[in-house]
């Protein structure tokens, strides 16, 4: 039986919102700054809807909607459930606030963190979640992903999912991770890479693409531990989590970061030092699992991420 959020009865897929534009450099900061500057305005959704939003954000109309989409999906801004107002999140404050650790996304730690927030977000990024969590081949063509997603949609009875919509979503997914030079008639804006292309997770080959499984030397242990804590909180387990779940469960760090068995074991072995003993790796009697004394609080999780940035970056942001 296939597991994971996509196979839960109440799940509703999301194949749109980005207006076909992949995440661009500077967009998350633009969204954060716009919402931060209007935090006292209860109707600040107008930042992305009013006539002056194009001038305010310096992009075209459709890109304004795309900026809001990416900032929401990546966990930088959110809608307050009580007031309906748009607000910045603690993660957004960490990256882009007054004491920002990396406002221009110059650190690979930030890119891995955004990749995690995006691809573990099953409710708002179906294609991204499914590709990293359920697609088991290392190579693919665009139609392979489209066919796979349409098969899931039909099997789950998802309503109003058209092939053309899924095709556009898959194209956006590919462009998020693989740069595409502009043609003779292409705009300069269209030739810019998504920042996530720097991670090297998807490699373009002749006629197809490859999901690259390699050493993740640029992935900080702090980001891995943060992701594991979030994944653990979503599981119906308490003090222990098996290696198998961490490696293979949909939405797990092993899946989202595309880690091989050796590197995953190394990451798990480093958890005790990274979390100051709250997480411990155990291989007792052949049973491979992580023991968690307790979940990290929201403040501890952010402190963990902050500690993973170079001291110089933290000093400059202070």
Image (tube, helix red, strand yellow):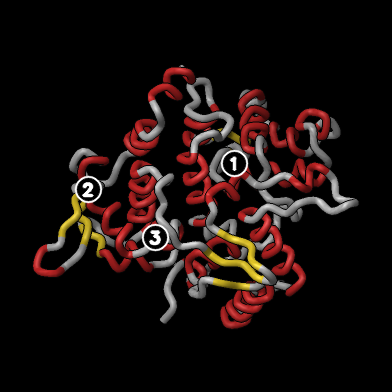
Given residues 62 and 196, the one toward you in this image is 196
Mark closest to the chain's N terminus, 2 or 3: 3
State the SS at label 2: strand
Given residues 107 and 238, the one toward you in this image is 107
Mark closest to the chain's N terminus, 1 or 3: 1
Image coordinates for residue 126, horizontal then vertical, percent: 58, 63
The structure residue drawn at horizontal position 66% and vertical position 39%, both measured from the top left corner, is 25
Given residues 13 and 256, the one toward you in this image is 256
Query: Which residue corresponds to mark 2?
Result: 279
- Residue 9 seen from this side: no
Image coordinates for residue 200, horizontal then vertical, percent: 54, 53
From mark 1 to mark 3, how far is it between C-alphas? 33 Å
Quarter holding the N terminus is bottom left
Q: Is residue 46 above or below residue 170?
A: above
Instruction: Please give the label number shown on residue 79.
Output: 1
Q: Are marks 2 and 3 in contact (CB under 8 Å)?
A: no
Instruction: Please give the label number shown on residue 187.
Output: none
Residue at far left of view: 285
The structure residue drawn at horizontal position 67% and vertical position 38%, both measured from the top left corner, is 27
From mark 2 to mark 3, how far is it between C-alphas? 19 Å
Q: Is residue 301 above or below residue 131?
A: above
Mark closest to the chain's N terminus, 1 or 2: 1
The structure residue drawn at horizontal position 70% and vertical position 68%, both measured from the top left corner, is 166
Image coordinates for residue 245, horizontal then vertical, percent: 32, 66
Q: Which of labels 1 and 2 is toward the front?
A: 2
From mark 1 to mark 2, how far is it between C-alphas? 32 Å
Residue at far right of view: 185
- Residue 20 seen from this side: yes
Say which quarter of the image contains residue 235: bottom left
- Residue 161 vs residue 92: left or right? right
Quarter holding the C terminus is top left
Query: Which residue corresponds to mark 3?
Result: 259
């Amino acid at each position: 039986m296939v597991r994971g959020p996509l196979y839960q009865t109440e799940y509703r897929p999301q194949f749109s919102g980005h207006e076909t534009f992949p995440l661009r450099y500077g967009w998350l900061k633009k969204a954060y700054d716009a919402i931060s500057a209007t935090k006292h305005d209860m109707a600040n959704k107008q930042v992305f809807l009013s006539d002056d939003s194009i001038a305010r954000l310096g992009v075209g109309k459709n890109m304004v909607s795309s900026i809001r989409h990416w900032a929401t999906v990546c966990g930088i801004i959110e809608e307050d459930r009580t007031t309906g107002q748009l607000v910045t999140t603690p993660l957004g404050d960490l990256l882009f606030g007054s004491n920002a650790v990396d406002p221009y996304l110059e650190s690979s730690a930030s890119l891995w963190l955004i990749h995690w927030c995006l691809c573990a977000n099953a409710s708002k990024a179906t294609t991204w979640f499914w590709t990293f969590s359920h697609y088991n081949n290392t190579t693919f063509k665009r139609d392979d992903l489209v066919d796979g997603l349409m098969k899931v949609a039909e099997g789950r009875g998802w309503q109003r999912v058209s092939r053309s919509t899924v095709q556009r979503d898959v194209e956006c997914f590919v462009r998020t991770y693989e740069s595409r030079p502009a043609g003779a008639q292409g705009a300069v804006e269209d030739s810019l890479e998504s920042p996530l292309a720097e991670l090297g997770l998807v490699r373009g080959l002749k006629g197809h693409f490859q999901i690259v499984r390699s050493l993740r030397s640029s992935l900080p242990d702090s980001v891995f531990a943060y992701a594991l804590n979030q994944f653990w909180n979503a599981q119906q387990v308490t003090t222990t989590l098996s290696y198998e779940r961490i490696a293979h469960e949909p939405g797990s760090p092993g899946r989202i970061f595309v880690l091989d068995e050796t590197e995953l074991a190394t990451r798990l072995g480093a958890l005790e030092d990274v979390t100051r003993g709250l997480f411990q790796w155990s291989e007792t009697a052949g049973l491979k699992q992580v023991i968690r004394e307790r979940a990290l609080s929201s403040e501890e999780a952010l402190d963990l991420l902050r500690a993973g940035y170079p001291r110089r970056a933290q000093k400059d942001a202070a």
